[in-house]
Image: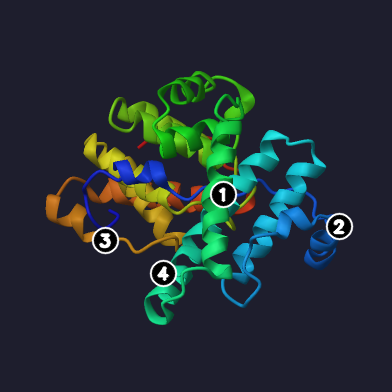
Amino acid sequence: MIRGKQSLFVVSMLLAFPLLIVGCDTQPSIKRICKRNPDICQGLNRDGWCQEQRDVVIKADYQVESTNRSEPALYNALIGWEDYRACIELAAQVEMKRLKIRQSQRVEGYIKAEQMLLDLNEETRNAKMPELLWYHWTRNQDKEAYKTYISYQDTDLLNKPELQLNLAAHYAQRDQEKAIEVLLKALSLYPNTDSMDQSIFTQLATLTYQLEDYRHSYIWTLVTQKLEIAPVNLQQFEEDNVLTIRDKQTAEKIAEQLAQDLAEGNFVAKRSYTF
């Protein structure tokens, strides 16, 4: 099975870094944005520190204004400002410690990041977008946001792999069978294996093993191996002596087909296979 048998749904999983909501990149250059909208760039450092993160927040803030402060744009801004704050905070601390500087572009950038995050958190507190609901739960322990997110589970609003992963985290300690069902649905939402979250395979192998469903745990361990998703340890099955030779042969055939289906985007969520 996947190395380690402990539960993979620990609390830290709730704080996994979310993905930005990707849209069409029709924005003007950073230089043009700053020239036309100086308020967006004011207060940010202009040296070489955190340039990538700085450019992201400039574009994100421009998109917020361009979309009349839409929820997807606000979400991207929140994630962007978090990344910028983490980067510029380190730079500012180093500068203050070594150079004894208290007021500099880096310090000002950190102060602006803190204020922007406070403002964006307040503005999105009552948002209904799933990504924002999960954000407010994981960052602010907002129980109402959490309840609303879970209430979306039978709707199309969570039909994205990363949103299903959040739902799986909810069920992992409550209903492991339901968590497996959700993880399988997440897999079915990927068009191919290029962007798949490797933790899904690890979780499927581990959860099925914990339920003593050794056959399906072996299948998902083999799939992980065939797709070269993560290191695996098949020796665990040998040591525990939980499968027959016939079980392994059948699992090998099933895993081969699953790996092919996943690679071609033809995977259909299914909990059990005939042995």
The Cα atoms of the two marked residues, 4 and 3, are separated by 43 Å
Q: Earlier along the polypeptide chain: callout 3 or callout 2?
A: 2
Query: How many numbered marks, from 0 up?
Result: 4
Which is more foreground, mark 1 or mark 3?
1
Residue situated in front as seen by the camera: 228 or 249: 228
Q: Are marks 1 and 3 in contact (CB under 8 Å)?
A: no
Q: Disc 3 on helix, strand or loop? A: loop
Give the image location of residue 101, x and y in percent. 46, 75
User: In the figure, 5 relative to 168: above or below?
Assistant: below
The quarter of the picture where residue 213 lies is top left
Between the residue at mark 4 and the residue at mark 1, the CA separation in whole angstroms equals 21 Å
For numbered disc 2, what is the local secondary structure?
helix
At x 80% / y 55%, what residue is drawn? 25
Q: Report the amino acid beneath label 4.
A: Gln
- The kind of residue on which mark 2 rests is Arg
Q: Disc 2 marks which residue?
A: 36
Considering only order in the chain, which callout, 2 or 1, is on the residue closer to the N terminus? 2
Q: Is residue 188 visible?
A: no
Residue linked to disc 1? 79
Percent across and percent down for residue 140 are 42, 35
Quarter of the figure that contains the C terminus = top left
- N-terminal of the pair, mark 2 or mark 4, is 2
Callout 2: few (<14), some (14-19), or many (20+) C-alpha neighbours within 10 Å?
A: few
